[in-house]
Amino acid sequence: MQPSNDHLLTRLVRLDEFGSEAYTASLVAGETELKAIAERLDIENAKAFAAELSITRRDTLIRIEGSIRGDLGRTCVVSLEPMRETIEEDFTAEYITEAGDEREGEFEADLDAPEPLEGDTLNLWDVALEQLVLSMSAHPRIEGAEAPKDPGAGARISPFDALKGLT
């Protein structure tokens, strides 16, 4: 088992640094970060990744608006050949600090509700890579790729075929 390179993907910012004025940050992956991204996402490789983030805070709500760009090496699910996936996405994410996440009793799940944050720091790489994963194709496929032809296709197989030779 290879050692984890997650420490390379850490840029912690204290939550109290965010206010009504936008806190901006740029993340650009170098060679070592690209290897760590490929390892974390379990993909062939990452050729490029960058993120631009603008973060504001109002009371317990933290809002992040940003964009991500990535050039990833993936495997086609049909042909199993290597392929490139290029991602360029804008996103908005909202988080709520522990102080604002005091829920009592039962509540209904709200898929648009802000995600709760634990602790007093936010890892900007985690935010950017979460958005990258959400933007990646669940089933990457080379355009025009066709599944290999099954040589036995068309032959009808019955569970009783094995019993035919017993008489």
Image: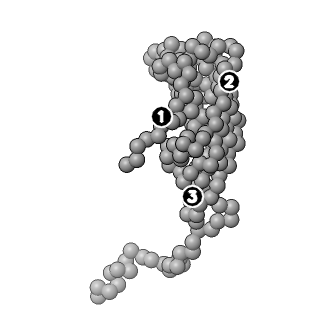
Mark 2 → mark 3, Cα distance in angstroms = 34 Å
Residue toward you, 24 or 137: 24
x and y, in percent, of residue 82 in the image: 59, 60
Q: For numbered disc 2, what is the local secondary structure?
A: strand
Q: CA distance from mark 1 to mark 2?
A: 22 Å
Q: Amino acid at mark 2?
A: Thr
163 relative to 78, above or below: below
**Which amino acid lies under the numbered mark 3 shown in the image of this protein?**
Thr
* Marker disc for residue 75: 3
Disc 2 residue crowd, few under 14, some 14–19, many 20+, Cα 10 Å? some
Q: Residue 21 at x, y = what percent? A: 70, 15
The image's mark for residue 24 is 2
Q: CA distance from mark 1 to mark 3?
A: 26 Å
Please tell me in which quadrant of the rendered image residue 122 appears: top right
Q: How many marks?
A: 3
Q: Name the residue tied to disc 1.
A: 7
The one nearer the camera, 80 or 17, is 17
> Residue at horizontal 60%, vertical 41%?
30
